[in-house]
């Protein structure tokens, strides 16, 4: 099997470091050569994996710009949002593939190779894995699930409940349920204190380029 050169893209270093560590277990079939927190891949790669944690979804300008970067190879969106219209929009936006965050690690790696070979575009996983998803995220040590952490990150960025619902493809009531759960876990009772807690615990986007571990 050909070894793939991979770039990872997101605004949160802890998210990408966790994903990098998971992919390193498959170092005989792929190599993470760049971790980018500014969405401007400058190393030639086969695949750019765009993680949507607290970021614009695959149908936004970030993916479009990546897809037009000749160094980025095939752009693959990595998301919990498997809404059919959102997936189609991401592919129309220039993405070459769309992967569920519910995929087990081995299946995720296999899917990347299949996308590279042109043997598939969309790979769905089990939503039941949302409570024990791969990688890492801010707030994990405090007991936040990845979905809860994503909601808190969007709150920290200043988004309203309606904007969060649109970004995460959730109902307003589901967003409110996540918010209440977040508040209980981090010990706050209102949005302003949640934002202050988020700012103090790494929930605001990073803006720098970091190197993969050797």
Image (cartoon, rainbow, N blue to C red):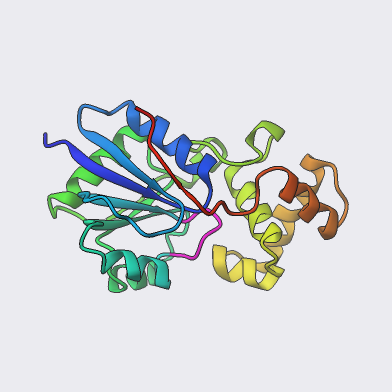
* Image quadrant occupied by the N terminus: top left
Residue 130 in the image, given as x and y percentages of width and height: 53, 43
Quarter of the view holding residue 28 = top left
**Which of these two is toward me, 167 or 46?**
46
Quarter of the view holding residue 131 = top right
Q: Is residue 121 visible?
A: no
In this image, 158 relative to 106: left or right? right
Residue 103 in the image, given as x and y percentages of width and height: 38, 42
Residue 11 in the image, given as x and y percentages of width and height: 51, 53
Residue 141 in the image, given as x and y percentages of width and height: 66, 31
Name the residue rendered at 80%, 52% in the picture. Answer: 196
In the depicted structure, whether residue 132 falls above or below residue 196: above
Name the residue rendered at 26%, 57% in the picture. Answer: 72
* Image quadrant occupied by the C terminus: top left
In the depicted structure, whether residue 92 falls above or below residue 26: below
Name the residue rendered at 20%, 51% in the picture. Answer: 115
**Which of these two is toward me, 34 or 48?**
34
**Which of these two is toward me, 145 or 138?**
138
Overall secondary structure of the magenta stretch?
Answer: loop
Quarter of the view holding residue 173 = bottom right
Q: What segment carries the magenta color?
A: 52-57
In this image, 87 relative to 118: left or right? right
Name the residue rendered at 56%, 67% in the picture. Answer: 167
Q: Is residue 183 visible?
A: yes
State yes or no: residue 96 in magenta: no
């Amino acid at each position: 099997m050909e070894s793939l050169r991979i770039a990872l893209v997101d605004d949160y270093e802890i998210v990408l470091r966790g994903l990098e560590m998971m992919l390193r277990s498959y170092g005989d079939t792929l190599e993470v050569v760049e971790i980018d927190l500014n969405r401007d891949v400058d190393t030639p790669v086969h695949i750019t994996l765009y993680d949507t944690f607290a970021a614009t979804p695959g149908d936004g300008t970030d993916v479009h710009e990546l897809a037009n970067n000749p160094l980025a190879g095939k752009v693959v969106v990595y998301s919990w949002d498997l809404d059919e219209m959102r997936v189609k929009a991401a592919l129309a936006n220039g993405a070459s593939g769309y992967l569920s965050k519910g995929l087990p690690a081995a299946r995720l790696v296999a899917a990347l190779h299949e996308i590279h070979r042109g043997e598939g575009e969309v790979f769905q996983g089990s939503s039941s894995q949302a409570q024990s998803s791969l990688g890492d995220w801010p707030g994990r040590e405090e007991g936040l699930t990845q979905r809860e952490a994503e909601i808190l990150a969007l709150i920290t960025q200043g988004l309203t409940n309606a904007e969060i619902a649109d970004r995460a493809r959730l109902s307003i009531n589901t967003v409110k349920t996540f918010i209440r759960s977040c508040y209980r876990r981090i010990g706050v009772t209102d949005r302003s204190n949640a934002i202050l807690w988020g700012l103090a615990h790494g929930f605001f986007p990073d803006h720098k380029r970091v190197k993969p571990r050797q």
